Each structure stands twice: as structure tokens, then as C-alpha cells.
Amino acid sequence: MFVKLVLATATSLAAAVLIAPAAHADTLDTKATKRHHHRGTSSEGANLPARGMTMAQVEQRFGAPAEKLAPAGGDTARHPTINRWRYNGYTVYFERNRVLHNVVDEAPPAPKS
């Protein structure tokens, strides 16, 4: 009985020692990644399209986009087409033909004096 306990403890300890070096964490530098500010609904910014609006509604209310980027996805029903329209200062993302969310471009950094 004592031998089984010692073997079980030794096995558990060996497994913990072997697994521990594999555990690590990455550090996210938020200053470097804050290029865009996400806005999900028009309640946060009344001058942005609301989630769920159709492409026609967005174009009617906000005008034609500065650029319509190439669609992504759409290869299967599980991967719907994602369209992106660039406006001055933000990008609107559509799933199929409905607004999914908006990404507001961050202002360029002020020049150093």
C-alpha cells in the first residue's frame, strides 16, 4: 500500500514538473494595439450606423462609402460574407448585408515639438 502511494505521488510530481515549463503567458502591449476604437451601437456615437441596419439604409443615411473593400468569407453557410465599407474616420463591417459593427480610426499621433 505504501509503495502504491509513493509511486502515485512520484508520478504526479513528475507530471507536474514536466507540464509546468510548458505553461506560459503572453503580454499584450495595449499601447501598440490601440489603433482603432470599436463601437458596437449607435448609442455610443449617434453619427455611426447602428447594428442591424441594412447596406441600403447605411448608404441612404450616411452616403456612399469612400471605399468598398473586397468581401471576405462566404465560402460556406457557416462562413457568411463579411463586407467592409470605409468612410472618413471609420469602417463599417457587414455580415451579409447587415451592420455587424463599426471601427473608428484613431487620430494620428500629434507631432513631437
Image: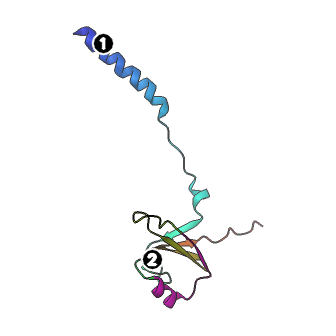
**Is 37 situated left or right of 53 in this image?**
right
Task: Name the residue rendered at 40%, 26% in the picture.
Answer: 16
- State the residue in front, 94 or 24: 94
Residue shown at 49% from the left, 81% from the top: 48
Instruction: Tell me the distance, in whole angstroms, between the alpha carbons under discs 2 and 1.
Output: 61 Å
In front: label 2 or label 1: 1
In the rendered image, residue 28, in percent from the top left (x then y), is placed at 55, 51
Q: Farthest residue toward the bottom?
A: 60
Q: Is residue 58 one of those drawn in magenta?
A: yes
Q: Name the residue under label 1.
A: 6
N-terminal of the pair, mark 2 or mark 1, is 1
- Residue 88: x and y, percent? 61, 80
Q: Residues within 10 Å of mark 2 (few under 14, many from 20)?
A: few
Seen as rendered, the residue at the extreme right is 113
Q: What residue type is labelled 2?
A: Glu
Q: Regarding mark 1 in the picture, which secondary structure is present there?
A: helix
Q: Give the labeled residue for mark 2.
A: 44
Identity of the residue drawn at 45% across and 87% down: 57
Q: Which picture quadrant has residue 44?
A: bottom left
Residue 95: x and y, percent?
Answer: 44, 72
Residue 12 against residue 46 in the figure, above or below: above
Q: Report if residue 2 lies within the magenta region.
A: no
Amino acid type of the residue that numbered disc 1 sits on in the rendered structure: Val
Magenta region, residue range:
55-71
**Quadrant the N terminus occupies:** top left
- Residue closer to the observer: 107 or 58: 58
Percent of width and height locating residue 41? 43, 76
Quadrant in the rendering for residue 10? top left
Callout 2 secondary element: loop
At horizontal 53% and vertical 87% (from top left) the residue drawn is: 62
Q: Residues within 10 Å of mark 1 (few under 14, many from 20)?
A: few
Q: In which quarter of the image is the C terminus?
A: bottom right
